Image: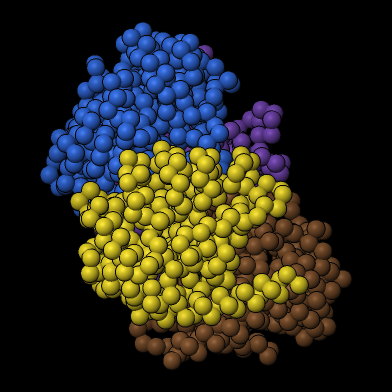
Chain colours: A blue, B yellow, C brown, D purple
Amino acid sequence: MENLKLAGINGHTAERTIITVGKVRIGAEFVVIAGPCSVENEEQTIKTAIQVKEAGAHILRGGAFKPRSSPYAFQGLGIKGLQILEKAKKETGLPVVTEVLDPRDVSWICEYADILQIGTRNMQNFSLLKEVGKAGKPVLLKRGMYSTLKEWLNCAEYVLAEGNPNVILCERGIRSFETYTRNTLDLAIVPSVKEVTHLPIIVDPSHGTGRMSLIEPMSLASVAAGAHGIMVEVHCNPGEALSDGDQSLPPSMFADMMKKIEFINSCMKKINTLKDK
Amino acid sequence: MENLKLAGINGHTAERTIITVGKVRIGAEFVVIAGPCSVENEEQTIKTAIQVKEAGAHILRGGAFKPRSSPYAFQGLGIKGLQILEKAKKETGLPVVTEVLDPRDVSWICEYADILQIGTRNMQNFSLLKEVGKAGKPVLLKRGMYSTLKEWLNCAEYVLAEGNPNVILCERGIRSFETYTRNTLDLAIVPSVKEVTHLPIIVDPSHGTGRMSLIEPMSLASVAAGAHGIMVEVHCNPGEALSDGDQSLPPSMFADMMKKIEFINSCMKKINTLKDK
Amino acid sequence: MENLKLAGINGHTAERTIITVGKVRIGAEFVVIAGPCSVENEEQTIKTAIQVKEAGAHILRGGAFKPRSSPYAFQGLGIKGLQILEKAKKETGLPVVTEVLDPRDVSWICEYADILQIGTRNMQNFSLLKEVGKAGKPVLLKRGMYSTLKEWLNCAEYVLAEGNPNVILCERGIRSFETYTRNTLDLAIVPSVKEVTHLPIIVDPSHGTGRMSLIEPMSLASVAAGAHGIMVEVHCNPGEALSDGDQSLPPSMFADMMKKIEFINSCMKKINTLKDK
Amino acid sequence: MENLKLAGINGHTAERTIITVGKVRIGAEFVVIAGPCSVENEEQTIKTAIQVKEAGAHILRGGAFKPRSSPYAFQGLGIKGLQILEKAKKETGLPVVTEVLDPRDVSWICEYADILQIGTRNMQNFSLLKEVGKAGKPVLLKRGMYSTLKEWLNCAEYVLAEGNPNVILCERGIRSFETYTRNTLDLAIVPSVKEVTHLPIIVDPSHGTGRMSLIEPMSLASVAAGAHGIMVEVHCNPGEALSDGDQSLPPSMFADMMKKIEFINSCMKKINTLKDK
């Protein structure tokens, strides 16, 4: 693809990007990011954080600023949410990823977050991309629900062009006519991404399907498709979640799933050894 | 539609919103917004402005900050572009609409613009919506290329909820599998919008089709579908445009089209009289 | 577009195809096809036929063989339905268009129908296309709800390649993520079609929108976009229709709409005279 | 889902359908269907058949009647193609699946085919569905590239309602705006299908992606997502294929992939044992 001066593989065999966050090496090992959709209160967040940590998650997710369709829906706890995430990090040692919505918030959110998330609705918010490009923290860039591979990688290029090489791509489903699932998870984009860019690519099966029952099979499929990780919504009590309860796993289901992921991941490592022969 | 406390018609027959900008009454008379995609330089902009004014356009459009897919594409002239628009306004008397990309720019762009445009990629940039809601200037809110009617109106609600009642909706085409046109212009959204909200709705056939040859028929169809106006890209020399040359009309074609629009508009007025009998 | 040996304009200025059915000249005058979705019984069909004739319709539509999503839904009256259409034709003098679903039925349905309709689900039913190509009767070829312009014209080419030059294209909406309307009516396809093929193009705003309230504005917009006609579902009692009641006009609304169509059509004729100057 | 009297699970825990074809038990073991897109000649077909058999495929695919976008493209060898498939079957012992396009052909194609394929363009060709329902042979029903889960299962219901319980569903990608891949493979439909119907579900990663390089990762992902099998295009010389060369695997790549599929499949069996605990 033309114009991807920094993000593209561009013919020559670029080394794949590995992004180190604490002890986690994104792009090198299969990474599981888990946690609640929204930070709702201290108890819910810390409880969930401990549970996902025990089950084997590597990074904690949690939204303090929530992009909601309606102005009258819960908009997140804001700075209070970030302070709760900070406590959860101290409690568990897990690095934190959280979404940033406004270029004016980038610098101070950096004090709380280990990874800045750009959501699907802001994929082409170029002011925000430039700002997180300057901030230096790793960026988790979700694919726009309407965006082609080419447009997505050009948005990564916006971040890279500001001098920040640490972009993690995240497939989270695109829009189609199908209504059984909330979005259409485009899993073939995983090996496609790996053909054209050296950046790591993870999958969000929670938003990608919108259904609790589909998260596990799509997580396993993500491992098999070659993803570098997944990002999953886990809530200590999905039925009472303020947002995305339908697509959040309870901690017990998450723990079960983690065992299967470890198993299939070790299987894939062996398969990749076959590949190299 | 639920939750549209301010944007919705909500059962009772709300009066339709009319937005006054200079002498133009958007929502009351058919309004034509025309001008270049990008402000490229003073000569091009003023020349085009004079030509669209002479042909009968009511408002001048022109981008000073351009949201471009690639970071290496022309990003607009920025403040210099706004100053050129100011001159074009003085020269022609036409009010100016220009796009704003960043919440930090809203207050000072207000000094140059009569209407603030929110582009399709920023439809759900909620920080930006809140900021233009506070700014007080009328807002032209383009439909997200991936967005449902309900999501779009909720974004209008974000602006209204900040105390700014002056939102103009603009259909600009959605994404589909069809590749002959750049987007799929969803003209049925025009009467649909009028069923559920009192806000005015205009159509952008330039982005909606991406082809110069389709702008005129789709503009006439917009009038017949009941739109309150159109927004058209006109360039004094489309072949040399720095952006969107393929979908810009040369001034002569625009002037021809304007005669037809006036004709069909007067025809529609008579038809609407039939309706009331 | 390559490979459209017969359907394409192919550089040289082909004369546009005009298809004569009884006194109607499709492609030359604006044609209105109207009638019930399904032929349900003699009374309903003949009553509706008389009403649409009185309102000015040129051709009667009515389905005897219905392609239904579920095997347990009403499948149409079959041959009995065709016999009813024959009576309605005798009563009103209106030529009849009806859908054919099976290549085995083509030859004998030809005895009842003046125009054979290929529905959206059968657009790429190549056996059926070849059979109607051989049958000689004019063919109304609906666009597949998933099909590109190129694919659609290639299906017309299938009919033409069998020696049948009389294909009427019919846009009926495509699939998108928008759910307010049943389909997304792609009105820009009308002038697009006219750029690449000499075949006539009509619009079906009933299926294209799926909402009674949107049929009139989209019909007027079709005239303005340059369509050669429309195809509208009319039912003497939409609330009791066995299929598509939500998108059928009652005869009184249809009659009102016809006056407006005549008015805007005469307006468009004047505009086209302007064009030629 | 309502109206799925026979195809639906409908609350009670139906036993899952297992379809026996020769020694193959579809729905019970992971099944690999492989072979050329089109039967082009005896040498190509038998050579490919032997190679896929040796690599471990269970069923041979090959098209004798090809649904092609253009009437001027290679339309398949017809009955000659079926005779070649018969020879390939004798040579290898592999059961044969081949596409049927026309209800008039069903009865005699049954003499050559072990499984009748309904292609994506004919998913809602209800005449054809009824005919294959009567014929008694197992039916491989591809999802329409535009169809929802509900519509697809209703098409299976058409076959079942004729007394034929042996329907294999096949996901082959749907249409979206993404152009890097030929279609968007909707892998989440696999566990979704298993939630609402007892029929087996396989995946076609060749059409689903349209790119040779994506077939292996998407095949492995299909296993992990819980599919009952895959259907893959293999050509002894993809560069010279008369159709779909870009998405056909050469036999060596197919053989490599089969080893990995066996490995991940045994891994998934162990995971499913974990599940039952």
What residue is drawn where x is 52% and y is 36%?
Answer: A71
Q: Nearer the viewer, residue D241 or D69?
A: D69
Q: Position of residue D239 (x, y in %)?
A: 26, 58
Q: In the picture provided, is B188 more to the left or to the right than C152?
A: right
Q: Is residue A172 above or below residue D210?
A: above
**Which residue is farthest left?**
A12
| Residue drawn at the location 16% of the way across and 46% of the way down | A5
**Residue plotted at (48% across, 88% down):** C274
Viewer-proximal residue among D75 and C116: C116
Residue D108 lies in what quarter of the image? bottom right
In this picture, residue A5 sits left or right of residue C235: left
Can residue D268 be seen at all in this image of the molecule? no
Please state the total of marks drawn on the protein image: 0
In the depicted structure, whether residue C210 falls above or below residue A124: below
Tell whether A96 sits left or right of D30.
Answer: left
Is residue D138 positioned above or below C212 on the image?
above
Q: Quadrant of residue B125?
A: top left
Residue C204, given in percent of the width and then of the height, sits at 62, 69
Pick whichever, D142 or C211, lies toward us.
Answer: C211
Residue extending farthest to the right is C43
Q: Confirm whether residue B12 shows in the render.
A: yes
Q: Residue at x 79, y 81 (%)?
A: C54
Q: Is residue A217 placed above or below D120 in the rendered structure?
A: above
Residue D260 position in % (x across, y down): 32, 32
**Residue D148 image position (x, y, % from top left):** 56, 47
Q: Quadrant of the N terminus of chain D?
A: top right
Q: In the rendered view, does C34 fall on the left or right side of D276?
A: right
